[in-house]
Image (cartoon, rainbow, N blue to C red):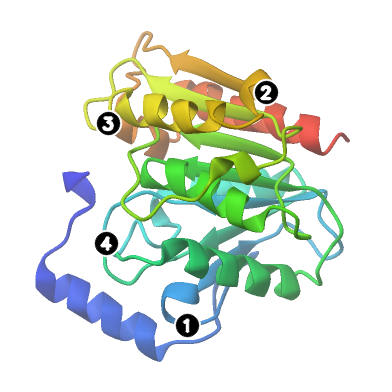
Amino acid sequence: MARLGRTAIVAFLALATVACGSRSVSRRGETSYGRGADEVWVFRAADGPPRSVVVFVHGHGGPLEDTPKYHRAWLRHLAARGDAVLYPRYELVPGDHDTVTHIVNAVRTGMKALGNPRVPVIGIGYSRGGRLVMDWAARASGTAFAPRALLSVFPASGEDPEEDLSRISSQTPVLVLVGDRDEVVGDLGAKALVRDLDAGSLRQNVGVEVVHSHGAFIASHLSVLDDSAGARSAFWDRADALIDIAAPR
């Protein structure tokens, strides 16, 4: 994802800012909590318990991908539907390790900020996060934060020691998306992910769909960052449908 890269100087400045920060309020309905790699952004449309909580795990990028900047339109859409969203930073430098532990810590912090609502949790991951969201789900198995549904968008291969995905409940619906014009990861990460999921008892609940390019919409790796009608149909609508299964209105 070269477009998201930054020079070492910019990365250093961003790292220094994060390391010194704590809770900050940057936008209406969006608040950050925690420090460093444990930082989490919480999106919510209004006071009161949300219908569900979505854990959104970003991809391998740079200082801005580690924040909600490129995904904010989608996150706000989810919040507007009545779903709270947790966006874990999980790293200070792209490619950092021990990421699942940081995601676990961020989710715990974000849920506490929401008042620990007893509502379904859904996991969405993009690119590197498409694998990490599954590893987090395996780690969260048997806890109050275990996800009821999982969406992996254009997953990349894992960069960290991978979790045993057979720990994910066999009742969890899983949807994996592959872009027909994904020039970065292609279908390699999806194949590896499905192989690992098939090793457990999840096989009957795992679906793989190809996101097809059409008209002006090109299903490239970065198309997930778009706010176009094609991107909304390809990604937002599929996520909405999955959330509606896990948390019916």
* Of 198 and 191, the residue lying toward us: 198
The label on residue 205 is 2
The amino acid type found where label 3 is placed reads Val
| Element carrying mark 4 | loop
Residue 35 disc label: 1
> Upstream in the sequence, badge 3 or badge 4?
4
Say which residue appears at 79% left-offset and 36% top-offset.
Answer: 246
Q: Amino acid at mark 4?
A: Pro
Q: CA distance from mark 2 to mark 1?
A: 36 Å
Q: CA distance from mark 1 to mark 4?
A: 16 Å
Which quarter of the rendering shows the N terminus?
top left
Residue 239 image offset from top left, x and y in percent: 62, 32
The numbered mark, 2 or 1, whose residue comes first in the sequence reads: 1
Q: Which residue is mark 3?
A: 185
Mark 2 vs mark 4: in front: 2
Q: Vertical placement of 42 versus 82: above or below? A: below
If the image is split into quadrants, where does the C terminus sit?
top right
Circles 1 and 4 in contact, beta carbons < 8 Å? no
Label 3 crowd (10 A; few <14 / some 14-19 / many >=20) = many
Badge 1 crowding class, 10 Å Cα cut-off, few under 14, some 14 to 19, many 20 or more, is some
Q: Are marks 2 and 1 in contact (CB under 8 Å)?
A: no
